[in-house]
Amino acid sequence: MVERPSILLVTLDTTRADAIGPDAKGVETPSFNALVPQGMRFRAAYCAVPQTLPSHTSMMTGLYAGGHGVHENARHLADTTPLLAERLHAAGYKTAAFISAFALAKRFGLARGFDVWDEDFGDNRAERNAQETTERALAFLHQQHPSQPLFLWVHYWDPHYPYTPPEPFRTKYAKNLYYGEVAFMDQQLGRLVAAFRQSAKQPVAMIFVGDHGEGLGEHGEQQHGNLMYQATMHVPLLLVGPGVKAGTSDTPVSTRRIFHTILDWAGIDATNSLRGTGNEHVVAAEAMKAFLDYGWQPQVMAVEGTRKAILAGSLEVYDVAADPGETHNLAPGASLTREQRATLRDYPIPSLAEASNATAPADAEERKKLASLGYVTADVKPVVRKDAPRPADMAPLFPILDEAAALFVREEYAKSIPLLQEILVKDPHNLDAALRLATAESALGRDQEAVAAYERAQAIAPDSPDVRTYLALHYAKTKDWQKAEPMLEQVLAQTPDKVPAIEALAMIREREGRLPDALALLQKLYTLRAPSGDELAHLGALAMQVGDTNAAVAAFEKVPGHDLELGVLYLDQHRFPEARDALDRVPPSHPDYPMVLFKRAQVAVLLHEPDAPARIEAAKQHANAMTRELIAHERLFQ
Ligand SMILES: [Zn+2]
């Protein structure tokens, strides 16, 4: 039997195919170049989605995004989808991953199957550079005893915007800092490869791949994620290892086949491996971000040979060999093969409802982290319309959309407003922008402007529960709060699990004095999302007021610092020993300590404790106006 190799997978974030390797112009990447003669370089490799998390998810599952469902960043892979590391782990591999950005954090679902998962970016940071990640990976490698084959995945983030390479790359590449980031990453790559070769069980196999490219202004796109041109879809891919001939291949391949290739090396399954023949004829890909966020046209790609088709409402066809800049659209005269047409036609377009359900429920801190990496997703379901714009026609709007969304997430509302207004001039049906504008006005206390903006959103989406919820939330915090009540009731009749609507209606019920209703709403709310400590304490107090002792106990038992309340409640429930223990935990510094002494004396009597008389005396001595009255009428003390 052939010895199974240790396998190194290095994913190079945001690295264009033409920015690394011997053919790259204007940038030197000696570490990568030294590997090229040892392996097979795929010169027509395509990512499955031009965004970090979905692209990596395809490499880790072998599926296109239409199959794994992670269409954009900040979504979560279903826990039932098998992952490469799980397969390798089950086959006896030691598995380790070193991640360089929060976009791939464990919470998004790719960590399953890894013995070691390292995403320690340091305090309040969302990323780390190639040197930091390499140090961690090297420290790990040096501890390995090479008796077991190793699967090591290292992810480098550096070429991602903003471009801030360290010296000497900053000076050397002052005119093109993006290249400076690639060159710095390449330097670290050299250290990693040397250490892997030295420390891992032999033989070794290695894959180096870009997760997507970078627009750098081509077709109006500075970064990546919105369009499907070569700048962002075409990525470097190099295989080195057993059974891999040295050379180059110009057959189009999808990077999702990294999954199959690694399973092949591990002796698990050779189907679809890039080592074998069995090439797929058509390479597919998608870019759904603008569709899912703004309701623009969904985009699907199908490449066969040198002919690349992009379907986004209308069809574009390019010969990427003769016209790598994709400036000359061959459609509609271009003849596509039957298989290519079928790929475009049959590629599954996600349903908007399904897609928004897959969103990882991010809290405010996590949303800020994602925003700091340039990733902001919409909060509302967009309006789908027949005349939806093609993303390629809207390219000038991308930077404005990104900046407006980032300002909004950072709660810089005043700065976001002019940008949101500009978006609505150019994309009048953009529900996300209309709602954010309304929310920003509302947050700044500009009621008239807020209501006008909500009315505008309502005109875009007359039946949207999102719009009704947000307008009701606005009313709920103004003097018109009574207007919110019927609106929220209607929202909850339609969508009973709408968290913000439940929150707002619970607040209104409390204000109206309908406390049992408020309590029921809050109990439902906390089955949908976890409450904070303060929220639990509030729930407990509300339950006490309503007289729901069980609910109050359940709430207070989960938050520290409520032993007086617990003591009172246990006493109510005739759980005297527990009441005693709870009251004994209350420190004398408690502002209501006279009440503690009074209750503790009651418990002492009920438990027939010998020091009960002394406790009654202490309660009397330290009584305040309230407890003096209670003590005077307490029959237990007679
Ligand atoms: Zn990426």
Image (cartoon, helix red, strand yellow):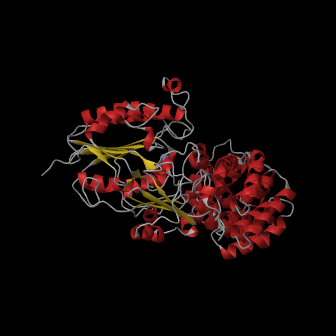
Q: Position of residue 49 (x, y in %)?
A: 48, 55
Residue at 69% in and 76% down: 493
Of residue 142 and residue 413, the one placed in the foreground of this image is 413
Would residue 88 be visible to someone looking at this image?
no
Q: Seen in the image, is 223 located left or right of residue 89? A: right
Image coords of residue 438 (percent x, y): 77, 58
Quick one: which residue is furthest to the front in this view? Answer: 333
> Left or right: where does residue 142 sit relative to residue 557?
left
Q: In the figure, residue 236 lies in which quadrant?
A: top left
Q: Is residue 139 left or right of residue 346?
A: left
Q: Quadrant of residue 547?
A: bottom right
- Give 102 or 300, whichever is nearer the viewer: 300
Q: Residue 128: give x, y in percent of width and height.
A: 49, 36
x 72%, y 67%: residue: 518
Q: Residue furthest left?
A: 1
Q: Quadrant of the C terminus?
A: bottom right
Q: Is residue 586 above or below residue 638?
A: above
Please give the name of the residue rendered at 64% of the width and 73% of the height, measured from the top-left corner.
496
- Image position, residue 572 (x, y; %): 64, 64
Q: Is 198 rendered above or below residue 460?
A: above
Q: Left of 133 or right of it: where is 629?
A: right
